[in-house]
Image: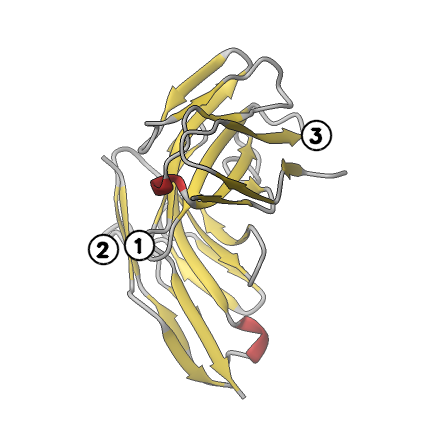
Amino acid sequence: NAGVTQTPKFQVLKTGQSMTLQCAQDMNHEYMSWYRQDPGMGLRLIHYSVGAGITDQGEVPNGYNVSRSTTEDFPLRLLSAAPSQTSVYFCASSYSGGQSGANVLTFGAGSRLTVL
Amino acid sequence: GNSVTQMEGPVTLSEEAFLTINCTYTATGYPSLFWYVQYPGEGLQLLLKATKADDKGSNKGFEATYRKETTSFHLEKGSVQVSDSAVYFCALNTNAGKSTFGDGTTLTVKP
């Protein structure tokens, strides 16, 4: 049982390049989300999804695009990378309902992105 | 909107000292409250949670009580160990997979 898998772990981009951060989960969770972590700023929500075919913006969506064609996958696309997007990115999944584990986020290991 | 305010760090303690990390929140509705921990080089993982007022979450000697009257969820541990050195995040969730996080508190425990 892999949980949440993110790739790549590290990436260096030049300003203006595009790339996709991959995220996959094997727990059949309906909710998936992307956060970025910057020093002293905690985690900020970029985009999230409540199910296949449904996505919405979080707190800091500009410059990022997402889609959710399957329950398992939730890729994050950087359209034209900027130095301000240098950060550590975390994908997370969770499920709703009345069970004890509901709304607990399971995180991937993170992807460290540097934009030069 | 929802927000979480966490005690500013970093916090440095000697082994076996008592730990408190303060967390207060603002939320619409009835949030669930969480503490997550991030060890160096790793992703976040759940430490403990509480889903309604007066609930106490506990795990690995850490405790936090959901106080609706003071909108707080302070993290405590009676005797910290070097292995507790990590970044601690307070978070809330109201619905639909959206969680709001505090800025994180870095704890260093010295032998």
Q: Chain of mark 1?
A: B
At label 3, the amino acid type is: Asp
Q: Which residue is the site of mark 3? A: A26
Q: Which residue is the site of mark 1? A: B67
> Dot 1: within a 10 Å radius of its alpha carbon, few (fewer than 14), some, or many (20 or more) residues?
some
Residue B18 image position (x, y, % from top left): 42, 80
Q: Chain of mark 2?
A: B
Looking at the rendered image, the disc whose residue lies closer to the viewer, 3 or 1, is 3
| Camera-side residue of B13 and B77 | B13
User: How far, Cα to Cα, is label 3 from label 1?
Assistant: 35 Å
| Image side of residue A111 versus residue B108, left or right | right
Residue B2 image position (x, y, % from top left): 26, 38
Q: Quadrant of the C terminus of chain B?
A: bottom right
> Dot 2: within a 10 Å radius of its alpha carbon, few (fewer than 14), some, or many (20 or more) residues?
few
Q: Which mark is residue B70?
A: 2
- At a point 43% along the width and 23% down the height, the residue shown is A79
Tally of numbered discs? 3
**Mark 2 secondary-structure assignment:** loop
Residue A110 image position (x, y, % from top left): 56, 45
| Camera-side residue of B88 and A78 | A78
| Image side of residue B39 versus residue A115, left or right | right
The reply to whether discs 1 and 2 touch (Cβ–Cβ < 8 Å) is: yes
User: Is label 3 on the same chain as label 2?
Assistant: no
Q: Is residue B56 visible?
A: yes
| Image side of residue B30 versus residue A34, left or right | left
**Mark 1 secondary-structure assignment:** loop
The reply to whether discs 3 and 1 touch (Cβ–Cβ < 8 Å) is: no
Q: Which mark is residue B31?
A: none
Q: Chain of mark 3?
A: A
**Mark 3 secondary-structure assignment:** loop
